[in-house]
Amino acid sequence: MSSTLTPDLFRRHDESDDARFYAFPRLVTHIDETAIAAVTQLYREFFPPNGRILDLMSSWVSHLPEEVRYSHVVGLGMNAEELAANPRLDEWLVQSLNENPQLPFADASFDACGICVSIQYLTDPVAVLEEVARVLTPNAPIVTFSNRCFPTKAVAVWQSLSDEDHGRLVAYYLTETGAFDRIQVLDRSDRASVRRSDPLFAVAGRRTAIGGRVPE
């Protein structure tokens, strides 16, 4: 972890075993339909058709566009029942990234990675994103999303910041890996509708072309 990102920033109100917290399946969506549509549109823009997709911190739905086919979609999450119910996953596994941030995949295994409304739960996000960089092909995108959270499991730094600052924080995580460039903080919230929807923020970056490995 960067010396700037001190451990106290990643404390949580509930430090009990994450596996117990996620043991009960939650077959619900955590953002509304308008925000989900914004996530899906971002995937249309960033994820290559026929690509190999990693859905990190996945659940029972991946929000991938229905009309786009990918060669292989792998989900990694915390609840087996949720993952088994996800129709877009060709393969899935259960792993706590707070217990073990190392991903069980070979270098350059994927052409894109998404993390949807979950990055706020990582206690060492830079270590996880370094691993994401390792398993991505050069120029592959990662898109992370922010807003909703389980407050007892979200890290302290996340809960101390505004929505706009969440985007800056995630961009900082990506920068700290030394493995992403063209980092963009995006606000895809729908403020034009009469009915107020959940805000949707994203951070996108591209894996730098350093032979498929994280730069030293």
Image: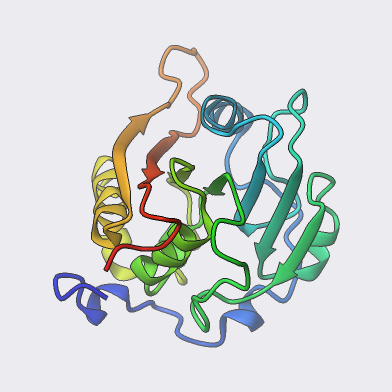
Q: Position of residue 24 (x, y in %)?
A: 74, 72
Looking at the image, can residue 100 be seen? yes
Residue at the farthest left position: 4
Q: Quadrant of residue 85?
A: bottom right
- Give the quarter of the figure containing the N terminus: bottom left
Q: Position of residue 113 (x, y in %)?
A: 55, 48
Q: Position of residue 198 (x, y in %)?
A: 49, 34
Task: Tell me which residue sits at (79%, 69%) in the image.
Answer: 80
- The one nearer the camera, 43 or 151, is 43
Q: Against 204, is 135 above or below?
A: below
Left or right for 127, reference 88: left
Q: Quadrant of residue 88?
A: top right
- The one nearer the camera, 193 or 55, is 55
Q: How many discs appear?
A: 0
Task: Tell me which residue sits at (79%, 59%) in the image.
Answer: 91
Q: Against 54, is 141 above or below?
A: above
Q: Position of residue 159 (x, y in %)?
A: 31, 60
Residue at the farthest bottom position: 16
Task: Tell me which residue sits at (33%, 55%) in the image.
Answer: 179
- Give the quarter of the figure containing the C terminus: bottom left
Q: Against 121, is 207 above or below?
A: above
Left or right for 51, reference 81: left
Which colour assignment does the render follow?
Answer: rainbow
Residue at the farthest front position: 211
Left or right for 28, reference 150: right
Looking at the image, can residue 151 be seen? no
Task: Tell me which residue sits at (49%, 12%) in the image.
Answer: 194
- The one nearer the camera, 13 or 72, is 72
